[in-house]
């Protein structure tokens, strides 16, 4: 788990967002913090969406690489069978 940078970024961004929301509530009070908390929540959601998009892109690249490797192995196997 520690080697997955995107997962680490996701956890860290959500943790920082939660800390900022609680800190705003503490420092500004309920009436004043609401507007700022809304923007922090929007930033947290944007970070989560970005991480999800990057994870999807990484997964698609991994699938393409697997397909390419499979094709190379199949071609090598067919070349071995064709050789006398």
Image (tube, rainbow, N blue to C red):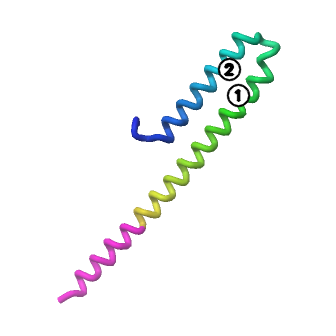
- Percent position of residue 19, x then y: 61, 20
Residue 24: numbered disc? none
- In the displayed structure, would residue 82 be above or below residue 75? below
Q: Residues within 10 Å of mark 2 (few under 14, many from 20)?
A: some
Q: CA distance from mark 2 to mark 1?
A: 7 Å
- Percent position of residue 47, x then y: 63, 38
Sequence-wise first label, 2 or 1: 2
- In the displayed structure, would residue 9 be above or below residue 65? above
Tally of numbered discs: 2
- In the displayed structure, would residue 17 be above or below residue 75? above
Q: Which element carries disc 2, helix, strand or loop?
A: helix
Residue at 77% x, 17% y: name it.
33
Residue at 46% x, 60% y: name it.
63
Question: Where is mark 1, residue-wise?
Answer: 40
Question: Where is mark 2, residue-wise?
Answer: 21
Magenta region, mostly helix, strand or loop?
helix
The quadrant in which residue 80 appears is bottom left
- Of the 4 image quadrants, the one containing the N terminus is top left
Q: Magenta region: which residues?
A: 68-84
Left or right of 7 on screen, residue 1 = left
The quadrant in which residue 44 appears is top right
Residue at far left of view: 84
Q: Is residue 83 magenta?
A: yes
- Percent position of residue 38, x then y: 76, 27
Residue at 42% x, 66% y: name it.
67
| Circle 2/circle 1 CB separation < 8 Å | yes
Residue at 76% x, 10% y: name it.
29
Left or right of 43 on screen, residue 7 = left
């Amino acid at each position: 788990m520690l080697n997955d940078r995107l997962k680490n970024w996701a956890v860290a961004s959500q943790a920082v967002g939660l800390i900022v929301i609680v800190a705003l509530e503490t420092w500004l009070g309920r009436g004043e913090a609401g507007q700022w908390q809304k923007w922090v929540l929007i930033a947290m959601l944007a970070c989560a969406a970005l991480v999800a998009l990057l994870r999807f892109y990484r997964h698609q690249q991994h699938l393409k690489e697997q397909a390419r490797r499979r094709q190379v192995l199949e071609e090598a196997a067919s070349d071995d069978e064709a050789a006398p």
